Amino acid sequence: MIRLKDVEMGFGTQLLYIGVQLSISEGDKIGLVGPNGSGKTTLLKLIQGTIHPEKGTIERRKGYRTSYLPQRRVVLKERTVLEEALSVFTHIVNMAEEMRKLESAMQKGRDLDKLLKRYAELQEKYERDAYTYESKTRKVLARLGFSEEDFSKRTQTQSGGFQMRIALAKLLLEEPEVMLLDEPTNYLDIKSIEGFENHLRGFKGAFVLVAHDRRLLDQCVEKIWSIENHRVVVEKGNYSFFVRASEKRRGRLEKRHREQQKEIEGAKRFVEKFRAKASTARRAKSREKMVAKLERIRLPGMPRTVRFTFPEADRIYGKAIELRGISKKFGKLSVFAEVDLTIGGSERIAIFGANGQGKTTLLKIIAGHLTPTSGAIWRSRKLKIAFYTQGAEEELDDAKTIFQEIQADARGYAPSELRNILGRFLFSGDDINKPVKVLSGGERTRLAILRVLLKPSNFLVLDEPANHLDIRSREILEEAVLSYQHTVLFAAHDRYMMDRLATKTLRMEDGKVTLYLGNYSYATQGRYDLSEPAGSDTEKPERERENVRARKRERLRELEAGYEEAKTNLDLQRARELWQEYEMTRREIERLDEWNNLSQDVKDS
């Protein structure tokens, strides 16, 4: 349907890509990835035809519709949400009007064959959509997180994110032959992301999707376009397959690079040795020209592994925090009620749920920034919380440079250490002297998170830290969290991140908080639920339950060894904390075993 031939594009002195050869065929499911600033949005606009390449051609088959969803700034008319979404089907209203005119014309008896033929064509199209388009519209809106109350809201009075969701709904309802989607999940919560994902998986047309949601790219795409070193690499398969293939491709490239460097060094030695002799000078000159003309193999930038020493803080071996019957109300609005939760040292807990369910409120209560309406909170005396809040990037001092902003919070670090840490967070070289005011949203978020990480703490609280971060920045954040040896509690819509980091998860829904002994995939596939030990829908895969039990038993052995060591060293405080965590873990294993026995009894019966 669409073919790009030898396309070259850049802006001023900045080259984006050269020699691009791409095609979109019917039903293609394509994920477009690359670092921020590599030209992903530009490529979508080239395909759409809103801009033109500096070199090369783009061929488009006639009669095929291509629809484009930008990252921001859509234009909507002054209508209600439902009316705006239904405007996609204006052609149905127009068909009905034309059919009424044809009926009047046919009564006159002239050109009857021609009129009947046209009427039959319209009737077939009309009957296909006319009786279902409103219910279909309501369904798509609901999938993207709109409530019945939202349907009557005026579009022009809503936020930019709200309007972007309306624009996304309209594009999905249009069902063009090709959809171009530029970060469509930016304004979606986790429930809406899953609704959008389900819609994409059932879409019959082709699409090119720019997204930082790796789970979405795994579930929905069958081909990856990756912008690398001013080229677009095409790899069949989903995102995870692409990552594995990229690692293999890099390995092959590194091998070729080593061989080429060896060849160049050998040629240089030959030239140095023989250029002075008259009998071999011609051969040396020829070899020198060959080396000069040799096209060098360039390696892409090496992904940085985030490893640095966090500021010292006392380790908590037992309970870090315990919530006892916590409730929170704002006026008459009850956010959640009777929450009981124990968080141990070194646990990593993810909180998920739709927007408005109270995730931020719960985090603020735990961090001590909000007071619960009722209930009690016990905190370890050793507790030191570092809290990344939504909007923390707006609190950065625009008058400072990146290095100055970090230096103000990072006590005990030498300047060279700070430069290394900044480099691992993708602020390298002269970039560290950039003023904060010129940073992009993603760069500001990275800097704000780094400020929090460099504060001495043993309990890290992160409220949706992945917002504004591209895939590589999310990987860096995950690596940093995995390096942190203390407790982490975070709220996120990034399912891939929750799967990678979380040892437990909390679902917040309809005023209830439910704890699961596993990551996001574990929690959302109906597996073991600590808050509801019995129920009609709780049959769980034995292998998954055994994995959880194995991890808990391993932790039990570690705690037992640590307890004996603490007793030997007469460290009674540590021994007491270890014993508390030991008892807590032992009880969790007992409950898992009880549930397993119950499931087995049900199977046997």
Image (cartoon, rainbow, N blue to C red):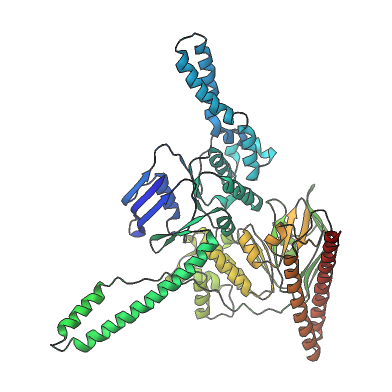
Q: List x then y, in percent, for residue 13.
A: 33, 59
The single residue placed furthest to the front in the displayed view is 604
In the rendered image, the quadrant that contains the N terminus is: top left
Viewer-proximal residue, 89 or 12? 89
Q: Is residue 128 left or right of residue 24?
A: right
Residue plotted at (42% across, 69% down): 300
Viewer-proximal residue, 365 or 140? 140
Which of the 4 image quarters holds residue 453? bottom right
Q: Is residue 87 left or right of residue 235?
A: right
Q: List x then y, in percent, for residue 218.
A: 57, 58
Residue plotted at (39% across, 41% down): 61
Q: Is residue 222 left or right of residue 348?
A: left
Q: List x then y, in percent, for residue 214.
A: 57, 59
Residue plotted at (45% across, 52% down): 41
Residue plotted at (77% across, 57% down): 513
Q: Is any part of residue 484 visible from this angle?
A: yes
In the rendered image, the quadrant that contains the C terminus is: bottom right
